[in-house]
Image: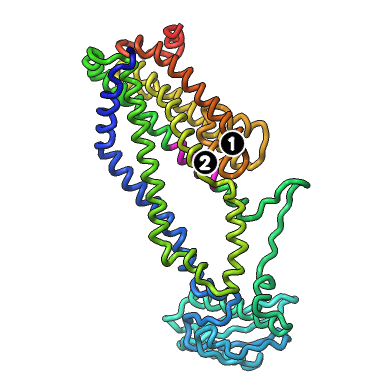
Amino acid sequence: MKTKGWREVFSFTFVQQVKTMSFIVGTIVMSLITALITFLANFLPTLFLGDRLNDPSGSGSAVVAAVDRLYISNETGYDIDFSNIGETLGVSCEMLTADNAEAKEEELKGSAAREMLSRIVNAGGAFSINSRYAANCTTVKESDCKSLNSVLSQEVKARFLASYGIEGSALIPALSSVNTTIAKAGEKPVNEIQQIINSVVPMISSIILFVFIFAYSQLVGQAVAIEKSSRIVEYLLTSIKPLALIVGKVLAICCVSVMQFIIIILSGGIGFLISMPFGILSKISTASGETAAAMDGVINELGEAFSSFDGMVFVIMLVTFILGFLLFAGLAGLAGSSVSKMEDLAPAMQPLSIVGVLGFYLAYFPQVTGEENSFSALARYLPISSPFILPSDYMLGKIGIPEALISIAVLAVTDILLMMFVAKVYEAIILHTGNRLKVGDMLKMSK
């Protein structure tokens, strides 16, 4: 049997690849980076938003102020109730008239006190807050005052609306921006969050799959070329058939890449779980009623955006990853076996690099434009590009299971035809020495 002995090659190659420093260091580094990214994605919003998560209107929760005293001058022409605003802002506040505000601003020009003046004016129907802090104060930074101004602006809007009887839960829609959607009649509209996800997820998915598939497939060509140039392959072929040699190597490196891919994905999940107790999701779960209501819309939009994200996504991603790897690994193995010297490997791998980059861009560009057209269908069913686009297309609901199965079937048939070609050519060229064989030479050998 021509594939007899592939298990021994598989075991040896798998162990050797796992023991290499590049695999160990690469896995550790990429796992740590992935875990850190997922950790920060859950933690950073709580760091930047702070207490505002528990009070979207900017009232009812004190913040740590950068100044010891804040002077506020209401020059809007509206009767806004600013009572107890100091408790909300976490700073001692004093209301000033417009004339007194002018004098205080002059005073701050030569002052070193930790004080700030905020003049609230009506600029053509829109409120504006013009703040000044002491010119000679070295302990108060402009960024600190901006943070205080941000909370003050929310408070001004909330108290202005309250003067017209809009308060409590009614503040949430009043202070929220108005989102708009547009779609053809009969089609489901896409919200803003889904638009962002539809742009980011496909690009990240394509890049990750391309890096893993292409990088590991090149290892196959490199391993074959090293064994051939060092003449180790001549000793191996005394007990193992050529086809068993290439099958064992391809499957071993495929398993190594899948294992590393799963480890990195799991590390991302671990990073997210570690950040759960103090991340944004825990803040949402313990938020006040108003905050929880405000967050419901965002959560619902996220749910709609990932409505197609189920267990089948992981199955499709794994299957397309393996089939895509087998496709490029088979080509890489042929390229590696066509050379007799390591210096000829780069030119031999060049056609594979062109095919790989072409497949990546075929998958990448339709996702950047976001429009469904014949070019998108070509990328989805063409074997050199489908591994990079299929998982994200299914994840985002652009295709269903029938379309995904058709794409996978086309890729699987291509792999089978390629392996049949490899089986005919590999045995004839593995012991070839001399000039590098070209594609035309390999095609002649397959007949």
In this picture, is 258 found above or below 236?
A: below
Q: Position of residue 162 (x, y in %)?
A: 69, 83
Left or right of 200 in this view: 253: left
Q: Which mark is residue 401?
A: 1
Q: Which of marks 1 and 2 precedes in the sequence?
A: 2
Foreground of the two, 151 or 263: 263
Q: Give the image location of residue 372, x and y in percent.
A: 66, 38
In the rendered image, residue 254, in percent from the top left (x then y), is placed at 37, 31
Between residues 241 and 41, which one lies in front from this camera angle? 241
Magenta-drawn stretch contains 204: yes
Question: Which residue occupies 41% across, 61% down?
Answer: 275
On the rendered structure, is 270 left or right of 361?
Answer: left
Q: Residue at x 55, y 25 (%)?
A: 410
- The three-letter code of the residue at mark 1 reads Ile
Report which quarter residue 270 is drawn in: bottom left
- In the displayed structure, 376 sits above or below 154; it is above
Q: Position of residue 23 (x, y in %)?
A: 30, 39
**Magenta-drawn stretch contains 342:** no
Instruction: State the image quarter where residue 341 is shown.
Output: top left
Tell me the residue at 50%/37% (across/down): 316
Judged from the image, the secondary structure of the residue bearing numbered disc 2 is helix
Residue 143: mark in rendering: none
Q: Write down the region rendered in magenta.
A: 201-211
276 above or below 387? below
| Image disc number at residue 312 | 2
